[in-house]
Amino acid sequence: MLNSEKMLTAIQNQDLEQAQKYFEQALTEDDDQTLLALADYLQSIGFYPQAKEIFLQLRADFPEVNINLAQIANEDGHIDEAFMYLDIIKPDHPDYLTALLVKADLYDTEGLTEVAREKLLEASQISQEPLVIFGLAEIEMNLSDFQAAIQHYAQLDNRAILEETGVSTYERIGRAYASLGKFETAIEFLEKAVEIEFDETTVFEVATLLYDQEEYQRANLYFKQLDSMNPDFAGYEYNYALSLHAEHQTKQALRVLQQGLSKNEFDSQLLLLASQLSYELHDKKAAENYLLKVLEIAEDDEEALMRLSNLYLEENRFEDVINLDRADIDSVLTKWNIAKAYQKLEDDTKALEIYDTLIVDLADNPDFLKDYIYILRKFGYDEKVKTFADKYLQLVPDDNDIADLREQLQ
């Protein structure tokens, strides 16, 4: 038995000390072809130091192993060393094409996608092998040159590429067309991809596109398929609920959201939509609880604050509205609701303070102007009332109440 074979047997028996002894004997006693096969296998199972030692020993007679050395150097994080090995493979070498592909991959990994594209273009001049064209198509996608990507993907046999790389060219073409705004064509290709092989991400993509195109029934069929085949798929519940809601299936939409929240109770997007749907189903308590949960967990809780202030104001819970007041509120609508609550509790001075801070942002909102006019009138600020009444009547000229008030002041 050859030393290489003995080494592999020792590795299988997890006797690494003995394996190393056989390895050292193989380096001096086994023939070159046996050592090449051993190095390839060692590289494939992650024994990089031993594989590298063999390749270094043989590279004078087998320059193609510089590609293997480059791959190992890359695995070890030595990018410059990897490129050094690849540069040894010259254009007249039979493995130059492989070296170009490895270079392209390294450049892409380093974020130098344009340089990677140049290497792949050079490779495509040497060979039209499917993997070369596929690599070029992938690079074009990464560079957002979607039309070029489509042209490259279209040259490939979808089933062959899918079998070799696990990537559907139909799915890629569909995404490229979607990025170009050609949604109907995108949907056709994505549906083709799903017909050939079920893929959760592709199903989600086509369902979302159909929802965006307001084809809710078809969208819901795909969302339901995803829900049945892989209910653990991350993040589909929000779009599925929106699509169900668009079809007036509010109860079912809420159940989908609750399913999502059972997996991640801290998803503020799901909580906000669950609150909205609960409100539509006349369950105001549940709507409130979802919003309170958002206030507990979300860094940006402005939307929840605004909705909660609307809910409390509608239920005449003015103290609860005021309890939402704090210094860092950005939403002018929330502040306006708080001002209204102060008015209802007859604290007009505090209410006017807030109105005065909002007039710049809401100067063109007729409803706000009307509220502001009346509170200014209450404090006897007639000149301000005239100014804002004139502005209001430009927006709502047929409001007789404000017109009469303006006439009285004149």
Image (cartoon, rainbow, N blue to C red):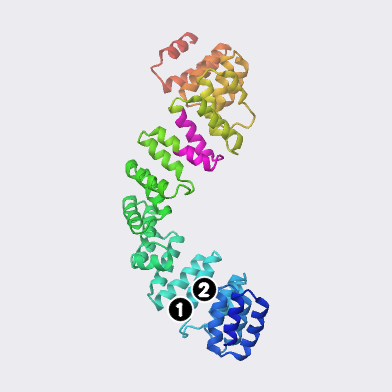
Q: Give whichever of 264, 112 is nearer the camera.
A: 264
Q: Quarter of the image holding residue 251? A: top left
Q: Amino acid at mark 2?
A: Lys
**Main SS class of the magenta portion in the image:** helix
Would you call the spot at circle 1 few (<14 residues within 10 Å), some (14-19), or many (20 or more)?
many
> For mark 2, what is the residue?
103
* Tag 1 residue: 97
Q: In the rendered view, does 125 fall on the left or right side of 88? A: left
Kind of residue indicated by mark 1: Leu
Q: Which residues are magenta?
A: 256-278
> In this view of the protein, can residue 359 be seen by the observer?
no
Element carrying mark 1 = helix
Q: Is residue 331 above or below residue 42?
A: above
What separation in Å lies between label 1 and label 2 (alpha carbons)? 10 Å
Instruction: Identify the mark at residue 361; answer none if there is no mark.
Output: none
Considering depth in this image, is 60 or 6 the residue closer to the camera? 6
Task: Judge whether 313 appears above or below 134 on screen.
Answer: above
Q: Residue 295 location in percent, x, y? A: 59, 33
